[in-house]
């Protein structure tokens, strides 16, 4: 058995997180890639990139769908997008490209690839987010320590945190008073759906609080394709996407947001609701 055949056998049986092939026949560890974050969760990746990344920051992490599938999490302007990277055992695929080695894969990112999705948003991958970041080793001393409740047990200690679930892109919106259609830039973050005049506008035209939304559904009443609506007590908002896939994505994540809100309310979460604001 030759060296190439031996390496091929190792590649097909080893965990792809441990070994990716190089074209020169040597082995390289994926673990040594500075922006590979292992089993970092989707929520943690979004929190990390939104709080400390910038437009074009990205990281690679394990996908929870199956072995050999990875997620590239990318920071856009006001959201984090996730793309699949598939390891086949002999190469890995990303977007329209297939790479035979980790070296070729990394070289592709070194050249700052431009990628886009169904939303039409284009992102230049410029800043790999490192797994290890130096922070000062400083700790606070506890000076006050008392219990604010009594009689509780570990069953009362339920970890909770709001999901981020970000998305952004252009949608065409029907006006409230004048029923004309205008294209606006929409951003979704936590329970707020904002729309702006365009992607470069610093201030939103309006902020919609999804805790006030009762339904998200496809709409066929406006004689437009790829149309859906958001039902609020004070108004129904009609929106249209460029493609059916994009409309499906918006409906899917908005419905998921509503289900999470209802789940929190059923659990008695005391989250304060905000109002939907219009900016003049």
Image (cartoon, rainbow, N blue to C red):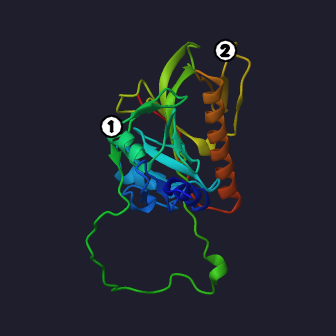
Which SS class for mark 2?
loop
Mark 2 vs mark 1, foreground winner is: 1
- Is residue 161 left or right of 66 when viewed as pictured? left
Who comes first in sequence, dot 2 or dot 1?
A: 1
Q: Secondary structure at mark 1?
A: loop
Q: Label for residue 79?
A: none
Residue 224's place in the image compared with 232, above or below, is above
Image location of residue 115, percent across then percent down: 44, 32
Q: Residues within 10 Å of mark 2 (few under 14, many from 20)?
A: few
Q: Which residue is mark 2?
A: 224
Q: Which residue is mark 1?
A: 111
User: Dividing the image into 4 quarters, which one contains the N terminus?
Assistant: bottom right
Question: Do tag 2 and tag 1 residues touch (Cβ < 8 Å)?
Answer: no
The residue positioned farthest toward the front in the image shown: 1
31 to the left or right of 210: left
Query: With respect to residue 158, does 109 lie above or below?
Result: above
């Amino acid at each position: 058995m030759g060296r190439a055949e031996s390496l091929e056998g190792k590649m097909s049986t080893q965990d792809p997180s441990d070994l990716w092939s190089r074209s020169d026949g040597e082995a390289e560890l994926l673990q040594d890639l500075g922006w590979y974050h292992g089993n970092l969760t989707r929520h943690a990746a979004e929190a990390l990139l939104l709080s400390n990344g910038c437009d074009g920051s990205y990281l690679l992490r394990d996908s929870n769908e199956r072995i050999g599938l990875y997620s590239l999490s990318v920071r856009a302007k006001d959201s984090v997008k996730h793309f699949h990277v598939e390891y086949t055992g002999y190469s890995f695929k990303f977007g329209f490209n297939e790479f035979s080695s980790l070296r070729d894969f990394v070289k592709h990112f070194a050249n700052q690839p431009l990628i886009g999705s169904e939303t039409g948003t284009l992102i230049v991958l410029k800043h790999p987010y490192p797994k290890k970041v130096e922070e000062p080793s400083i700790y606070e001393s506890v000076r006050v320590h008392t219990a604010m409740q009594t009689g509780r047990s570990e069953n009362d200690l339920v970890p909770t945190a709001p999901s981020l679930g970000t998305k952004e892109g252009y949608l065409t919106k029907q006006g409230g008073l004048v029923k004309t259609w205008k294209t606006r830039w929409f951003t979704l973050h936590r329970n707020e759906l904002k729309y702006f005049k365009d992607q470069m506008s610093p201030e939103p035209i309006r902020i919609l609080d999804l805790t006030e939304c009762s339904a998200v559904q496809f709409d066929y009443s406006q004689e437009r394709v790829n149309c859906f609506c958001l039902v609020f007590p004070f108004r129904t908002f009609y929106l249209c996407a460029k493609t059916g896939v994009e409309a499906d994505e918006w409906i899917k994540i908005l419905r998921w947001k509503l289900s999470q809100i209802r789940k929190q309310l059923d659990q008695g979460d005391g989250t304060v609701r905000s109002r939907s604001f219009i900016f003049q």
